Image (tube, rainbow, N blue to C red):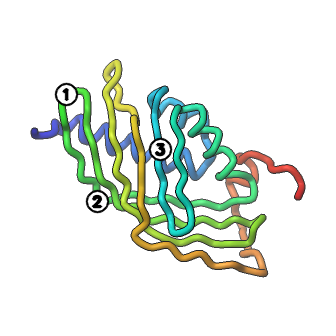
Amino acid sequence: MALPLEDYELIRQLKYRYCRCIDTANLDELRELFTEDAGVCYVGGSYRFEAQGRDKILEAIGYAFHSEAVAFHHVNHPEIALDSPTEAHATWYLKDWFCDLRNKIVTDGSALYRDRYVKIGGEWKIRFASYERVFEIVTPFTEPPNLTAHWLARHGRQLPAS
């Protein structure tokens, strides 16, 4: 089924907002992007994270993208297909970089997102988001990077002292 260009663009903007909200720990806006019964499944080289329900997803993202983290998510090459006037699915290519200052590791990698969307009240929402790594490199460090800007330090969840 051909995808109307307006729906295609709205789904692209939804996914781009998802990445921005994760990297900036904007959980309030992120909440609006998921359906209440949304699910996620993220599979990395050494982890598998699954959650069902918007509140559980947001809680996990809040703990992962905290004040001692630096994050970058970039999605591109969307392959979006309309399944019906109110349902769609897409594959996205992810390039991401994550620095955990507390645990002193950097994760650099790429993955393929496979998402499902639903249109509710005229707005596209994420019903299910998943990815599986194409590659993942986890590198420990002893000296922290010389950060001259650090958004999550000011806006991310403050972790208790270790």
Q: From what the image shows, is residue 148 above or below residue 159?
A: below
- At label 1, the amino acid type is Pro
Few, some or many residues within 10 Å of mark 3 (<14, 14–19, 20+): many
The residue tagged 1 is: 85
**Residue reaching furthest to the right:** 161
Mark 2 to mark 3: distance in Å?
A: 21 Å
- At label 2, the amino acid type is His
Left or right of 140 in this view: 55? left
Query: Which image quadrant is residue 77 in?
Result: bottom left
Query: Which image quadrant is residue 149 in?
Result: bottom right
Task: Give the x, y percent position of residue 44.
Answer: 50, 64
Please tell me whether mark 2 or mark 3 is closer to you in this view: 3
Say whether disc 3 or disc 1 marks the residue closer to the N-terminus. 3
Q: From what the image shows, is residue 162 above or below residue 141?
A: above
Q: Nearer the viewer, residue 83 or 4?
A: 83
Q: Secondary structure at mark 3?
A: strand
Residue 77, disc: 2
Whether residues under marks 2 and 1 lie with C-beta atoms below 8 angstroms apart, the answer is no
Quarter of the picture holding the N terminus:
top left
The residue tagged 3 is: 40
